[in-house]
Amino acid sequence: MMTLEASDMAMLRSLSGYDLSLEVAKMATKYGLPEATIMAMLPSQNPPGYSQGGEYDPSPQANSNTPIVDNNYKDYTTPAQVMDKSNFRFEYDPTPGVSQRRQNVDQAILCPGCGVALGIPAIRPIKVTCPQCMLESTFTS
């Protein structure tokens, strides 16, 4: 009996449904074997909730999937950081009352959504809408 290469068998084991049937057809052409023979080579995988005989089994089944932990995950939803406002300069603002608003700016923070610097007064709590990404945040400290 002819066997398939290990890489081809591994690929077939990872597929299911229509993708599996397409790959089995390709392998049948490649190796000159009938599709039924290739399917018989694969270990039988019963759908969840069905017994080996193909009958429905209503008893709860244990899930063998374990969560994957990604050590390189970066959390981009960190809270805003209060920064020294002297590191930033104001951009041109033609609206009336700009000088009064500039005098009220005591702190600079980075928007938690996009990271743009925002000048805010020291009043807490304060609700700020970022003009860059339109994220509305409330700062309490």
Image (cartoon, rainbow, N blue to C red):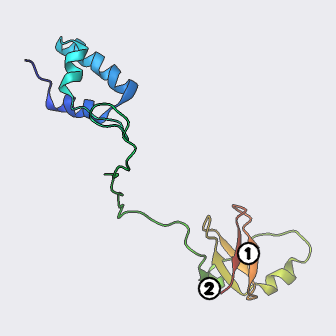
Q: Which disc number belongs to residue 3? A: none
Percent coordinates x, y for residue 45 in the rendering: 28, 35
Q: Which disc number belongs to residue 90? A: 1
Q: Is residue 120 rendered to the left or right of residue 96?
A: left
Taking 32 as reference, is 6 above or below it?
below
Say which residue label 2 marks.
84
Secondary element under disc 2, as helix, strand or loop, is loop
Percent coordinates x, y for residue 114 in the rendering: 61, 64
- Residue at point 38%, 27% (across, down): 17
Percent coordinates x, y for residue 110 in the rendering: 62, 74
- Residue at point 26%, 33% (across, down): 13
Q: Residue 49 versus residue 16: which sits nearer the camera?
A: 49
Name the amino acid, label 2: Asp
Q: Quadrant of residue 119?
A: bottom right
- Residue at point 74%, 84% (across, down): 125
Q: CA distance from mark 2 to mark 1?
A: 13 Å
> Disc 2 vs disc 1: which is toward the camera?
2
Secondary element under disc 1, as helix, strand or loop, is loop
Residue at the extreme left of the image, as rendered: 1
Reading the chain from its start, which is encountered first: label 2 or label 1?
2
Q: Quadrant of residue 36?
A: top left
Q: Quadrant of residue 132?
A: bottom right
Taking 67 as reference, is 97 above or below it?
below
Percent coordinates x, y for residue 41 in the rendering: 18, 25
Q: Residue 66 versus residue 124: which sits nearer the camera?
A: 66
Q: Residues within 10 Å of mark 2 (few under 14, many from 20)?
A: few
Which quarter of the image is occupied by the N terminus?
A: top left
Q: Is residue 79 rendered to the left or right of residue 3?
A: right
- The number of callouts visible is 2
